[in-house]
Image (tube, helix red, strand yellow):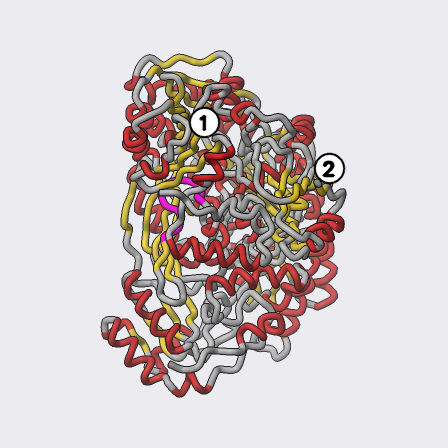
Amino acid sequence: MAVKPENEAELSAGVAGARGPLRVQGGGTRGFQGAGELLETGGLAGIELYEPGALTLVAGAGTPLAEIEAALEAEGQRLAFEPMDHRGLMGTGGEPTIGGVVAANVSGPRRIQVGACRDHLLGVRFVDGTGQVISNGGRVMKNVTGYDLVKLMAGSWGTLGVLSQVSLKVLPKPETQATLAVEIADAGTAVRALSAALGSPFEVSGAAHAEGQALVRIEGFEGSVSYRAGRLAEVLAPFGAVREVAEGAALWTGIRDVLAFHGVPGDVWRISVKPGDTAAAVADFGTGQIVLDWGGGLIWALVPEGTDLRARLRVPGHATLVRAAAGTRARIGMFHPESAPLARIAEGLRARFDPRGIFNPGLMSAPVGA
Amino acid sequence: MEMPLPDPAILAKKSSLVERLRAVLPGDAVISDEAETRAYECDALTAYRCPPLCAVLPSSTEQVAAVLRICHEMGVPVVPRGSGTSLAGGALPTADCVILGVARMNAVLETDYNNRFIRVQTGRTNLSVSGAVEEENFFYAPDPSSQLACAIAGNIAMNSGGAHCLKYGVTTNNLMGVTMVMMDGTVVEIGGAHLDAPGLDLLGVICGSEGQLGVVTEATLRILRKPEGARPVLMGFDSNEVAGACVSDIIKAGVLPVAIEFMDRPCIEACEAFAQAGYPMCEALLIVEVEGSEAEIAHQLGLIKEIAARHNPVELREAKDADEAGRIWLGRKSAFGAMGQINDYMCLDGTIPVSELPFVLRRIGELSREYGLDVANVFHAGDGNMHPLILFNANEPGQLELCEALGAEILKLCVEVGGCLTGEHGVGIEKRDLMLHQYSDADLEAQMAVKDVFDPQWLLNPAKVFPLSVSQARRAPRPAAA
């Protein structure tokens, strides 16, 4: 049986009255099959406030991402952190919701320039494991009034509470973009090229490596973009012939959604490391197909089913299992193990926010097979 | 401002505490002489003072851990201190606490331009972080006004911002990792040179927690390549409303300046008298700065001037060279000094939705007349972070209390219009008792639950952030003396 509250009060009552585990779901585009009764947030929908002049938007957690993006588009604005659409990669249907994006801190290629989803999240309302409604942050750009539970909720995958409302910082959509490409086969050289671009003053908003090409994106006003494209071509010239890509926008959607792995069998891992460690990490994986984003700091790896890349990651960072058969997920878990003291803190926080352990039990804290 | 009474049992064991601290620290790193501890009796909120039991100045993470283990065992509260520049009393001691100053820990540990980060000990000052990467044309973005003196430790504790955070964000957006010592002496590493957390975003909740969850001893900070150039334009308007509308129009037009600073008439007059920057005498003044190459700057300033022109500015002045740019910023940068010369002042830090700017400025004017205290406004308009300066005479009995009452009214106003009590200074003791206007009991309970997990005995930075009435039950039962 599914529970689909239509407002925060119903959500609160539903959680308070729950007699067993709840599987919290926004649009269901990431295909989890966890235990427990399904709790859908899709009823908590609608944009509640949008002030383009203040760069802020407040919406119910179940609001479809598409609805938010359309409202922003009409005012020439956007969610700058560029959240990915998981459907192609996961082979799922459903409608991505803003709550789902926030709960997993989903951030795309522009993360290296403007920050992650959590950096654009100004406030949250959520219901904790006892049914208590809690508010933190607000709808202003700068806020140090009390502890920042907003960040804590972003990326907590519904294990601390169920989001009912989020407020976000939005940004102007630039006039135009340009994408430069250089043929580079190996990850190490590609990362050096991307680092050179990112270390320049030319405000790179995307730096990826896919299918043998290092890709660099810049955005802004027309004149500024063409000037910076010219200067960046000089920066990249030592790495090979630089050309401008015609269909840049579509290309970056493909990077964001990891188009290269759509429909290709295998497990997909998402690994975050220091860009300078990427080549070594990829060599240690010893298998699979690789796409790099975030200047090389984000590795997307397509590997044979059941491969546990966490065991092969020898540099500082972390690996998350994004796509795998339900059985593999259940067996090895999705997340990277934390150091003992941090795991203790995380468990302590979960015990306080969800004392009955009913939210997505085991999702973030599943024991990890060595 | 009410502070909890010191615990006589702790005061009584001062000598054994000092003896134990001396065993783990160099001789000059433990300050217990009553005259010398006075140096730590307050931070930049000088209206409140209280010498600590003693102060320690460790020079490594290991020493910090040793100090905290001792204090944890003996049940002694610890107040961490960066450079003591908090305007909110974030480092105000209690008489039964140990001040843990990180000033001696100011080394650069690692600089990595390819991966664009720097790792420093947190006693290092904000400006000297940028200084350490300047020769490669990099910088550390958050730039609080106190950047010459304030420490990264305090920046992390208060999630400090600055004039340029409209484009670059505040501390939390530029902090990649920390080494932190928990109250029981456990050293934890959170984040690092890679992005985002594998599990819960603990870094996010530590930043801005006012030193109540742990003592951050090392930090990995994002560094950025400097822009090719930057240039400000100065605009004067004959009303606050019009200037506010201009700010909103600039943002809506898709221009994202690095800074939009706003000054009202009382502030303009004081700055002009102090710094002679050549500001026009008008009701409201905006300084808008953009970055990029010469052509990019010209293009953006062209757009901004076009928008400004629609609002009939009484003055529109673009800096033609570095000297003129310097003069445009001169008045703004000396605003606090200028105020300090005329009067004692209290600097508030409420943040409001930008759309509420004209209304809030009008209400502040009314409240100012009601209380009979002048208020000058200087603030970061792009992100709605206001800095009303309430002028008063500290030597006149009753004026401080009157000033605090007016300050509380203004902050409540900020909350009423959808804003918050503090944008970048922190709650400290100053705004502690106003927290109930911003948050419900349940909201505060959730925040205190976080503190319970990190510091179960509530020994770190006591009596800050949460109203005393709300935290009473948690603070009261101190563990028995070891």
Helix, strand or loop at label 2? It is loop
The mark lying in front, picked from 2 and 1, is: 2
* Above or below for B269 versus B115: below
Q: Secondary structure at mark 1?
A: strand
- Dominant secondary structure of the residues highlighted in magenta in the image: loop
Q: Is residue A254 left or right of residue A278?
A: right
- Contact check, label 2 and label 1, Cβ < 8 Å: no
Q: Residues within 10 Å of mark 1 (few under 14, many from 20)?
A: many
Check residue A339 in the rendering and tell me which mark sits there, or answer none: none
Look at the image and tell me in which quarter the N terminus of chain B lies.
Answer: bottom right
- In this image, A254 relative to B349: left or right? left
- Mark 2–mark 1 distance (CA, rounded to whole Å): 31 Å
Q: Residue at x 42, y 71 (%)?
A: B78
Can you give x and y, in whole percent of width and height, for residue A310 in the image?
A: 36, 38
Residue occupied by mark 1: A206
Q: Is residue B134 left or right of residue A250?
A: left
Please give the chain letter of the residue carrying mark 2: A
Give amino acid for label 2: Gly
Which span of residues is magenta-colored? B189-198
Depth check: A176 or B471 in front?
Answer: B471
Q: Do the residues at pointers 2 and 1 share their chain?
A: yes
Residue A157 versus residue B58: which sits nearer the camera?
A: A157
What residue does disc 2 label?
A46
Q: Is residue B47 above or below residue B292?
A: below
Q: Provide residue B253's location: percent of width, then percent of height.
A: 63, 30
Tell me: residue B305, above or below residue B173. Answer: above
- Residue A221 % position (x, y): 54, 23
